[in-house]
Image (spheres, rainbow, N blue to C red):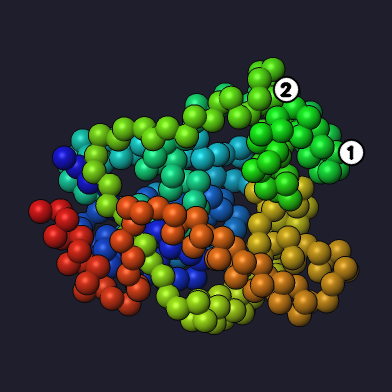
Amino acid sequence: MKTLIVIIGPTGVGKTELCLTIARHLKTPIINADSRQIFAELPIGTCAPTPEQQATVKHYFVGNHHLQDYYSAAKFEQDALSLLSRLFNGEEDDIQHDTALMSGGSMMYIDAVCKGIDNIPTVDDQTRQLMKQRLTTEGLKALVDELKQLDPEHWEIVDRNNPRRVIHALEICHMTGRTYTSFRTNSIKHRPFNIIKIGLTRPREVLYERINQRVLDMMAQGLEEEARHVYPLRHLNSLNTVGYKELFTYFDGLIPFQEAVRQIQSNTRQYMRKQLTWFKKDESVTWFEPDNIEDILKYIDYNLL
């Protein structure tokens, strides 16, 4: 049976370089599972694979969408499974791959491919535009209160500070007349391939140092200019992203530049902790430090026998 190798880990742990090594070892491309690296306008702030790295190994789902495009974990599930079928059947690059490689830190994207996500209806444009307008005019708190009335069960677990999560649940409630909860079965879908999951981690203090330095490196590479370029589109959910929302606040004159940098570092560390908490719940993951390249390759080769 064909095999999908999945490399997961928090932001800043070192997935990109390791995956280049694994991809060359397996002679397979990299399927990118990052919900922000898909946007062509955000290469610096999302630490997307560089053109040089992509020239070395073929990457999918990097810079293949624009900020105004609607994209979701459900769409990624469809697109990634279609790509895997083509890779395994030799229809993508004239090579019939026995092994594929997927890597990323977006928890929902990883789960969408490995476990599947519930068949929640696609929101029509009219409902989506209405809810976006209501967020602007009424504010998030009013929508959170409405969700509590329409779907108290989902209200209990949803991130009430995340407009996208709240709005999506309300969109489904209004469009279907049913609760968002009623569509969530949490059943794991069968996949026609084996899955090997490898998690990458480092000591917490090392991750903090790497994140702090990476933010400084991104600023040196031109993150402020990149953020200014997309600033007119700041209302888009795709820009409700660490690294951009803090700089937008600086552009608004509400905080000084150094405070924006500090907040980016702090919020990235917080997101890293959230990722680790999510990934650690998955008992099928085998964990390594990314510098242990030889052990990781041995583990992969052994499990492919």
Give x and y (percent) for residue 220: 62, 79
* Above or below: residue 122 compared with residue 67: above
Q: Left of 241 or right of it: where is 16?
A: left
Q: Which mark is residue 93?
A: none
Return the residue nearer the eye: 51 or 186. Answer: 186
Quarter-wise, where is residue 197 in the image?
bottom left
Name which residue type carries label 1. Answer: Thr
Q: Where's residue 302, x and y in %?
A: 14, 60
Furthest toward the left, the residue is 305
User: What separation in Å lies between label 1 and label 2 (alpha carbons)?
Assistant: 18 Å
Q: Which residue extends farthest top?
A: 177
Tell me if 214 is positioned left or right of 1 in this view: right
Say which element carries label 2: helix
Between 100 and 305, the one nearer to me in the picture: 305
Question: Image height check: is 267 above or below 182?
Answer: below
Which image quadrant is residue 168 in?
top right
Location of the N terminus (image quadrant): top left
The image shows residue 179 at horizontal and vertical percentages of 66, 25
Q: Is residue 4 left or right of residue 122?
A: left
**Residue 234 image offset from top left, x and y in percent:** 75, 52
Badge 2 density bin: few <14, some 14–19, many ≥20, Cα 10 Å: some
User: Residue at position x 20%, y 60% from top?
Assistant: 300
Q: Nearer the viewer, residue 96 or 171?
A: 171
Q: Is residue 63 visible?
A: no
Tag 2: residue type? Answer: His
Which circle's residue, 1 or 2, is located before the other in the chain?
1
Q: Secondary structure at mark 1?
A: helix
Residue topped by disc 2: 174
Task: Say which residue label 1 marks.
Answer: 137
Q: Residue at x 49, y 29 (%)?
A: 185
Mark 1 Cα shell of 10 Å, populated few (<14), some (14-19), many (≥20) = few
What residue is rendered at 26% in x and 63% in y?
Answer: 22
